[in-house]
Amino acid sequence: MDLSEKIKKDIKDNKIMLYMKGTKEMPMCGFSSTVVNILNLHKVDYKTTNVLEDVNIRHELSKLSNWPTIPQLFYKGELIGGCDIAVELHNSGQLKEIFEK
């Protein structure tokens, strides 16, 4: 399985998938940390991939999602967006509604 297929499989197989810098236990940037904190507030299960482990992950992910920045949050196979969008959806209450679907 090549990297592109692995990314597609991870997004498909995990209800909530977060591509981030670092890990959920130790985020390596403020934006990734913010999204992890939001997900933890919602008490949802989610899987993460550290894009810093392999420079090719970030490149392939951005090609697939057509989204240039990290973090990238996916829900049920669909891109929600990055940190700013996650914060906006959380503050408006929409993220809770999305997760309750």
Image (cartoon, rainbow, N blue to C red):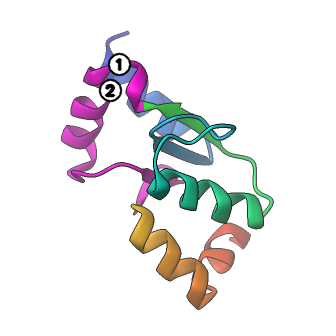
Marking on residue 37: none
Does 53 lie within the magenta span?
A: yes
CB within 8 Å, label 2 to label 1: yes
Q: Nearer the viewer, residue 34 or 79?
A: 34
Query: In this picture, which residue range is highlighted in magenta?
Result: 51-80
Q: Which residue is mark 1?
A: 54
Cα distance between the residues tagged 2 and 1: 6 Å
- In the rendered image, which quarter contains the C terminus? bottom right
- Label 2: which secondary element: helix
Where is residue 7? Give x, y as percent.
40, 29
User: Which residue reaches farthest bottom?
Assistant: 92
Where is residue 27? Give x, y as percent.
56, 42
- Label 1: which secondary element: loop
Q: In this rendering, would 30 be left or right of 81?
A: right
Q: Nearer the viewer, residue 2 or 56?
A: 56
Give the residue at x 45% y 39%: 21
Where is residue 65? Give x, y as percent.
27, 48
User: Which residue reaches farthest top?
Assistant: 1
Q: Which residue is mark 2?
A: 57
Where is residue 13? Give x, y as percent.
58, 35
- In the rendered image, which quarter contains the N terminus? top left
Amino acid type of the residue that numbered disc 2 sits on in the rendered structure: Ile
Give the residue at x 68% y 76%: 96
Position of residue 47 relative to residue 5, above or below, is below
Q: Residues within 10 Å of mark 2 (few under 14, many from 20)?
A: some
Give the quadrant of residue 42.
bottom right
Give the quadrant of residue 59.
top left
Q: Residues within 10 Å of mark 1 (few under 14, many from 20)?
A: few
User: Which residue reaches farthest right?
Assistant: 43
Give the residue at x 32% y 26%: 57
> Disc 2 vs disc 1: which is toward the camera?
1
